[in-house]
Image: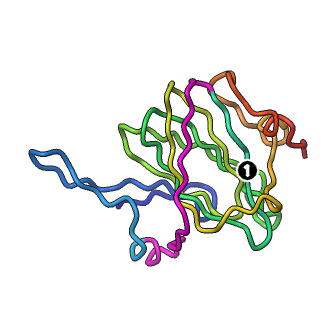
Amino acid sequence: MKIKKTKLKDCVEIFPNPIRDSRGFFQRIFDTKILKDKNLVSNIVNINNSFSKYKGTTRGLHYQIGKSKETKICRCINGKCDIYIIDIDKKSKNYLKHVRVTLDSKKRNMVMVPRNCANGFQTLEDNTEVIYFVSNYYNPNNERGLNFFDKKLKIKLRLKPTIISKKDMNWKHL
């Protein structure tokens, strides 16, 4: 696994290392030892799957608070999407700054979203599917969100959203 840092603390892009032969390839997409050795999250409690039928579908920006904070490792297994990761740690020098990582099922890259970050994504192709390796159990009472269209976040989506949930549209602005 190759790990590339971003400007946000503990937010890294991960590139699995496929072993190829005449049959195709084999690759490890999660390795507790490698992540632990790099001081990254290594305790995964569940794996979630999201499917978006239409290009431009926009989801997020979600995060959990308190004991429900979670780290996520995201991978696009079909199609392509932009993942937006926003630092929400008020003590951080990067507070409210964000990175955008394009996940592409053909590149097979992944991104680690740290526990002090919100994240969301926008699909760039129809029939995009994303899996999330998550370090904590979801608690609906501790779910929070940011609004993609909050001017303070300075997020420029690549596409005009085609579908966005009422809940995600109604997250308050800062």
Horizontal and vertical percent position of residue 104: 44, 38
- The correct choice, above or below, for 73 with respect to 150 in the image is below
**Is 174 left, or right, of 166 in this rendering?**
right
For the residue pair 52 and 90, the one nearer the viewer reads as 52
Q: Amino acid at mark 1?
A: His
Return the residue at label 1: 62
Horizontal and vertical percent position of residue 22: 9, 45
Is 8 a magenta residue? no
**Is 142 left, or right, of 87 in this rendering?**
right
- Name the residue rendered at 65%, 49% in the picture: 85
Q: Residues in magenta?
A: 35-56
**Is 45 left, or right, of 164 in this rendering?**
left
State which quarter of the image contains the N terminus.
bottom left
Query: What colour scheme governs how the chains and residues are painted in the rendered image of this protein?
Result: rainbow
- Name the residue rendered at 40%, 77% in the picture: 33
State how many labels appear: 1
Rendered image quadrant of residue 149: top right
**Is 73 left, or right, of 23 in this rendering?**
right
Dot 1 lies on which element?
strand
Query: Pointer 1: residues within 10 angstroms few (<14), some, or many (20+)?
Result: some
User: Which residue appears farthest toward the left when viewing the image?
Assistant: 22
Horizontal and vertical percent position of residue 82: 57, 37
- Name the residue rendered at 50%, 26% in the picture: 125
- Name the residue rendered at 43%, 78% in the picture: 37
Is 55 a magenta residue? yes
